[in-house]
Image (spheres, coloured by chain):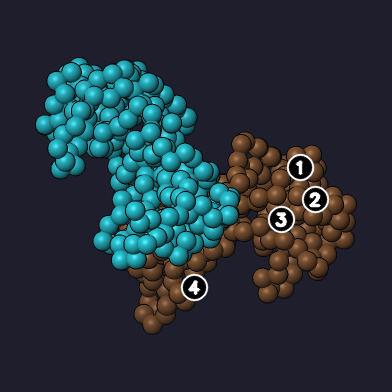
Chain colours: A cyan, B brown
Amino acid sequence: MPNENSHRGDKLAPAEKARRLKLIIAYDGATFRGWQSQASSDTIQDRLENAFARVAGRKIRVHGAGRTDTGVHALGQCAHADVSATRLTPVVWMNALNASLPPQIRIVACRFVPMSFHARFSARGKIYRYRIATTPTFLPLDVDRAWHVISPLDDDALRAAAALFIGTHDFAGFAANRGQAPESTTRTIRSVRVRRTAGMTVIEFDGDGFLYKMVRLMVGAIICCATGKETIEVVQHRLLRADGSGARLVAPAGGLTLVRVRY
Amino acid sequence: MPNENSHRGDKLAPAEKARRLKLIIAYDGATFRGWQSQASSDTIQDRLENAFARVAGRKIRVHGAGRTDTGVHALGQCAHADVSATRLTPVVWMNALNASLPPQIRIVACRFVPMSFHARFSARGKIYRYRIATTPTFLPLDVDRAWHVISPLDDDALRAAAALFIGTHDFAGFAANRGQAPESTTRTIRSVRVRRTAGMTVIEFDGDGFLYKMVRLMVGAIICCATGKETIEVVQHRLLRADGSGARLVAPAGGLTLVRVRY
């Protein structure tokens, strides 16, 4: 039986030991066209794959924990990539990749993980943060980093609406269609934390997973309740009916940050 | 004796009652080439004067409390401008100006003040804030908004160096020359507050006035002490000698924000 190396014409690379790198990535979403690779190649995944190509001298695919839309930021997006088991340590990889990336994308941590780890399929949950600027004027340093809401926010309504989403629900009423065949739309939200200071309201969602545009649709509904444009009952009904038809408010992307992926 | 209106050929406009507007202005310094008007016309003063011209239909000069360099931000820069005493209220002025300004510049408050008020000469003090990012990696959302310092900061040295500047001193050792004839270089700093959280150190200076690049030179010296590159004694000596010659570290512009002008 011929061994692998005797097949000169086939597509197998010479047996090469691969190792899997787990990356924690922060980015300023205002600069790019979202996470996922596109023809325009101005996405975060494209920039990461370009950086890997420069460091490794060959195309390496980067698998993210999830896509983020244009304008959405990250403090702790997660991804994995398979590299040859050279003598490069994870810290050397991190520094080399960062040197090839624009300052708007940074690898903040990097380590080898078992080949069974998958950034997307191993994820057990995510934490998202949403910032709402409540200053009378939208301050320049909050532009692209918060949603400016001028109407006064009723604190009781805001907190009651936020609490509606805690627990296990069919979130079809708070998801947008990405054009794919619908999978299960049931998700569990462990907590929704609201922190309010002068001029800024921050809502943090911790859940086992989030559907497409789900955080921004929940924030839209919470703010509609807090500004008196919708009642808690209407939002509760949409959650129970699991129906995404009808007018819904999607909070703007700039207010959203992927804080952490839990494994 | 002929009255004013009989002089057809002179440069006086027909007697028109003027009112003085006081403006509080916030801006993202990363977008513009500083405060002061330039041929390139991409400064904050230029943008404000363009907005006034669009609203008033004529050139109106905007007088700032002080110039800020390229990259320096403001939450509460102050300026005044003289407008005709039309029926436009300050709120209408504010909204009309904001509609003609990019989102990176916002008038956050506006009111009529006596003609004796002068944004620069009436100022009794200013508050500046400087942000130092101490995370291992410079996070994308801090880029252009903080100085990234990787070396560990010794808390005692940092606070001792910051305290050196409180009081009345000749700050010639902490000023850059703008090419003008030197005026007095004595200033009084009322307080220097240091706040430290995980990943961010903020130093806030409250003083009766600041020389050119003075805050950034003080921050440079404080950080040199905190990282052990300079001793407190060397910095103290430079302050006592009032001598700006020799190597000095200027903290980068992006970390600096003009918080408020006191009148």
Residue occupying image coordinates x 25% and y 28%: A221
Residue B228 numbered mark, or none: 2
Distance (Cα) linking label 1 and label 2 = 8 Å
Residue occupying image coordinates x 54% and y 58%: A96
Q: Nearer the viewer, mark 1 or mark 3?
A: 1
Task: Identify the subunit bearing mark 2.
Answer: B
Q: What residue is shown with label 4?
A: B38
Residue occupying image coordinates x 61% and y 42%: B200
Measured as percent of width and height from the top left, residue B6 is found at: 38, 77
Classify mark 3: residues with Cα within 10 Å, few (<14), some (14-19) or many (20+): some
Which is nearer the eye, A247 or A79? A79
Which amino acid type is shown beneath numbered disc 2? Gly
Which quadrant of the rendered structure holds the C terminus of chain A?
top left
Image quadrant where residue B242 sits? bottom right
Q: What residue is shown with label 3?
A: B220
Upstream in sequence: badge 1 or badge 4: 4
Distance (Cα) linking label 1 and label 3 = 14 Å
